[in-house]
Image (cartoon, grey):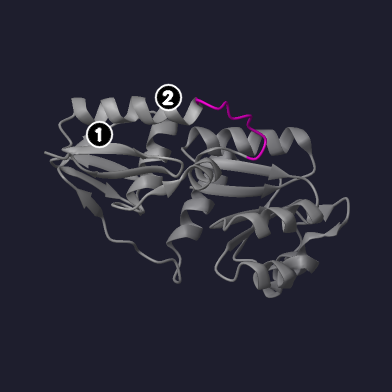
Amino acid sequence: MKILVVEDQRDLGSMMRDRLGRSGYVVDCVGTIAETLEALRAYDYPVLLLDRRLPDGDGMNFLPQIRSLRPSIRVLMVTALRSIDDRINGLDAGADDYLVKPFAADELLARVRASLRRPGAVSIPTVSVGALSFDLNQREAYVNGRPLILPKRELLLLETLMRRAGRAVMHSTIIDEIYGLDEQVQNNALKMLASRLRQRLRDAGAGVDIYATRSVGYLIAPVRV
């Protein structure tokens, strides 16, 4: 799952990205409203962490435009403005939640998880292919009911493929979903990642394979006999 962090303080933005990243999220971090709108036009983020005092304006004033671009996005306002009026104004402007700086990293994670559970968030049924099942809400994989533990990047690739099980997923879509904006992706990185995940699924007896579709991408489907 990919999250957009809008924070112009580089150290704080890096801390948020690192902490969220260690919890399995892919994080894009930008520092201005202009960059925010550009990112939102390019990708449908489920969650936006939005600072208010930004170099090109007050983040709160752009909430209507953000909602127009991405009506279903969950917006968590993260700001040093702490008065009751500031919180009320932020929520009334369209934010789903309001977190005051400084904050504990664990609270940030809890608020992100809570935002994804709120009414309006669609509960997605578990997807099963062969002996493999994937809980898209909890982002957990199982083989014959037993948990399958995967490294972060392989789990992200599996999630991307299982969301579209049985259909070819374009290389560009996969890269968008499992790598951040500022990550340099080598030409063979995705091929190597798919190869490692394919082997893990075989070793676990998942009964599925990851097939390369020429000039398109990859798909996950039952093992062909």
Element type where label 1 sits in the image: strand
Residue extent of the magenta highlight: 181-188
- Quarter of the image that includes the C terminus: top left
218 sits to left or right of 172: left
Q: Residue at x 79, y 39 (%)?
A: 9
Instruction: Specify whether residue 86 is painted magenta.
Output: no
* Residue closest to the eye, 189 or 78: 189
Type of amino acid under label 2: Met
Q: Looking at the rendering, which quadrant does residue 47 occupy?
A: bottom right
Q: Residue at x 35, y 25 (%)?
A: 196
Q: Which mark is residue 192?
A: 2
Task: Give the label, 1 or 2, closer to the camera.
Answer: 2
213 sits to left or right of 25: left
Type of amino acid under label 1: Leu
Answer whether residue 11 is visible to the viewer in this image. Answer: yes
* Residue closest to the eye, 60 or 168: 168
* Residue closest to the eye, 128 or 10: 128
Give how far apart the Cα atoms at labels 1 and 2 are. Answer: 20 Å
Q: Position of residue 222 (x, y in %)?
A: 19, 44
Answer whether residue 102 is visible to the viewer in this image. Answer: no
136 sits to left or right of 90: left
Q: Position of residue 12 (x, y in %)?
A: 72, 37
